[in-house]
Every structure is written in C-alpha cells, then in structure tokens.
Image: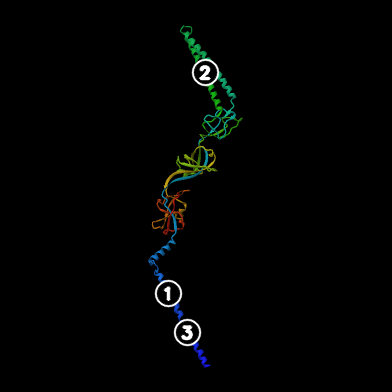
Amino acid sequence: MNEEAGMFGGRDRLAIEGDVPRRRRWPLIIGALVVVAALAIAFVMMGGGSAPAEQKGKAAAKGGNNGQIPTVTVAVPGRSQIGNEISGTGSLAARREMPVGVPGEGGMVVRVLVEPGQWVGAGQVLALIDRSVQTQTAASLEAQVRVARADASLAQSELDRAKALVDRGFISKADLERKTATRDQALARVRVAEAQLAETRARNRRLDIRAPEAGLVLTRGVEPGQIVSSGSGVLFRMAKGGEMEMRVQLSEADLQRVRVGASVQVQPVGSDAVFTGQVWQVSPVIDQQTRQGVARVALAYDPALRPGGFASARIVAGVTEAPLLPQSAVQSDERGNFVYIINAKDEAERRPITTGEVSDAGVAIVSGLSGNERVVVTAGAFLNPGQKVIPQLQKKAQ
C-alpha cells in the first residue's frame, strides 16, 4: 500500500512539476508578440517603405487638404456692349389720324364706296351725296354765262362800228363813250356769271366725301340713305399713309432717358410678332395725376398693328460698356450687392458692386469690377472671405 501510494504520489508530483514550465512560457510568448507589434508600428511610423518620411508626410498633408478645399466655377467676364433698355406699355394708334366729315352743304348719301381697312388715294371719293337740285342750279348758271357772253359780243360789235363812223362825223364822241361803257358792262356780267357757275361747281364737288390724303380707312360711320350735313361729325377716320405708332406710357424718370430716334421693339398683346420702330416724339409735359409721360414710337403699317390695341415696348435708351455676369454670380445681403472673386492665392474675396440693367443675357455691373477678375459664378453663396478654393474656369458657349 505504501509503495503504491509512493508510486502514485511520485507521478502526481512529476505531472505538477511538468506543468509549471508550460505556464511560465505563455506570458513570454505574449510579451514577445507585443514587442514585435510595437517594432512594426515604429518601423512604419519612421518611414519603413521606399519613400522618405518627409515626402510621405507632404503627400498625406496634400491629400488631406484637397479633400477639404471646395471647387468653384469662375469666369472672366471682360466688358460687353450692353443696351440700356426701358420697358413700358401703351396703346397703338394711327400716327396721323385724319377725321373726315362733310365739307359742304351735305344732303342724302347715295353710295358709300369704301370699307374699313381699304387703301385710298388723295382726293378719292369715299361717299356720294345726292346732287339733283345742285345739278339744275349749275345748268341754269351755265345758261346765264352764255347769255352774258352773247350780250358782251353784241356790245363789242356795236362799239367797233361806232369807232368806224366817228371819224366820218356820223357818231359823236359821247355816243362812242356810251357804247364803250355798254361793252364793259357786258364783259363784267360775263365774269360774274362765270364766277357764279364756278362757285356752284365747286360746291357740287364738295358734296362728295373725299379723302384728304392717301392712306388707310380705319372706320366708317355713314350708310346710304343717311342725311348728312356739316354738323354730322366724323363720317370716316383715316391713317395718313397707313403710318402707325405706339404711345408708350413711361414714368417721369424713364422719360428723361428717352431720346428721339431711339430704337424700340414693340410686341402687341396676343401676338408673338415683334415690330421695330423709332421714337419720333417725346412728350414735353407730364400728367399731373399719373406722373407719367408719353413717348410716341413710329411704326410701319402691318395688319397686326391695330389702332386701339395694347402693346408692350422695349426702348433702347443707350449703349454702355460694362462686365456682364449671370444672375447666379451676384449675391446680396444687408450690406448690398457683391460678388466673390478669386485672387492670385486662390482665395475668395468679397467685392462690392453696383448692378445696372438686368436682361436675359445677364446682369450688367456698373461699378466694382474691371472685367479682368476671376469671378465666382456658382457656389458663391457657400463661400466665406479668405476661404481657399480650387477655381475651375467656365467654358465659353460657342
């Protein structure tokens, strides 16, 4: 028993003694691994590659900065010829409207020979007036003229015979003078009769309603059978030469900028057509109620230009040379309008500006830019003064 116990007790002691070295080796292994890892990290940190540590640091710094610097689109606007436009509205009308009424005694209208929209010549008959009575009067005066001429011819013959007999002593000089006076009276009666006939014929011609000038008939206010006289008012309205105009209503300030001869683009309401005209008159007075004046724009005839219609106008009040920017480039705050420009260090700088005309082409910059700057056209709202950026030049449209 003791031997067995000694045998088993010796085995247990050997097993325990063998486990002790194993337990002691694990901390050594772990420690060795930690040391190796630390050495590897130190090797990497100190540049353990083909590139020097300084170059890798610069590359890392560069890559980190590029990831944070924004890219913005810039443009160099230069200077452009910009037309200063003034917008306004107004009505269309005949440039020289001619009202046509009854110039003579009037009477009953027999025929109307024209319609609105028809072109007529100077002196052309527009309407005929009944002249049956006037015709008889003219015929009677023609007969009186013939009678007066016959009397004058007879008086002249008697005077010629008297002159031949006075030298022979058959007729006294007193008789010769009486015959001369009779002849002169007969000739005077001829002239009176002829003048009366001419007056009647002139009156008869005035019975017809005629066009005073060549032009376009705009309205007609008479029909056959109507009795007209000098008090009947306007029977026809005409546009002299067919010339039209637009009467543009403008504010007092805008009217000061308009000059005679300025080019105007006119677009009637409801039409896509645009007509080119010129300012031919600027109103010398301002309406006291509306504080507006009228600029009259001459237009050539076109069927789309109907007097009384409404239209819009763009008047070119002058041409200036200035930088032109898209509206996206112009910013504004409580300090006013401004843009961001990129300096030589690729840093954003705030530049105060004064804007001018705004059109489809862009915003004219009256002051603040020379046109040679690199101006941020997009993303300007997200920049701050002094911020570093990567500028990308905008390509010009072909």
Q: How many marks?
A: 3
Task: Tell me the CA gap for discs 2 and 1.
Answer: 149 Å
In this view of the protein, which residue sits in the foreground, 185 or 14? 14
User: Colour scheme of this structure image?
Assistant: rainbow
Q: Residues within 10 Å of mark 3 (few under 14, many from 20)?
A: few
**Image coordinates for residue 148, horizontal then vertical, percent:** 53, 17
At label 3, the amino acid type is Gly
The secondary structure type at the circle numbered 1 is: helix
Return the disc, 3 or 2, that comes first in the chain's sequence: 3
Residue under the image location 59 percent in, 24 percent down: 133
Q: Which residue is mark 3?
A: 18
Q: Residue furthest bottom?
A: 2
Q: Which residue is mark 2?
A: 190
Q: Earlier along the polypeptide chain: callout 1 or callout 3?
A: 3
Near-viewer residue (69 or 355): 69
Which mark is first along the chain, 1 or 2? 1
Residue 186 at least partly seen: yes
The residue tagged with tag 3: helix, strand or loop?
helix
Report helix, strand or loop for mark 2: helix
Q: CA distance from mark 3 to mark 2?
A: 174 Å
Horizontal side of 44 relative to 121 (left or right) equals left
User: Which residue type carries mark 1?
Assistant: Val
Can you give x and y, in whole percent of width and height, for residue 26 in the image?
46, 79
- Residue 70 numbered mark, or none: none
> Which of the two residues, 51 or 4, is positioned nearer the viewer here?
4
* Residue where numbered disc 1 is placed: 36
Q: CA distance from mark 1 to mark 3?
A: 29 Å
In the rendered image of this protein, does residue 265 appear above or below residue 161? below
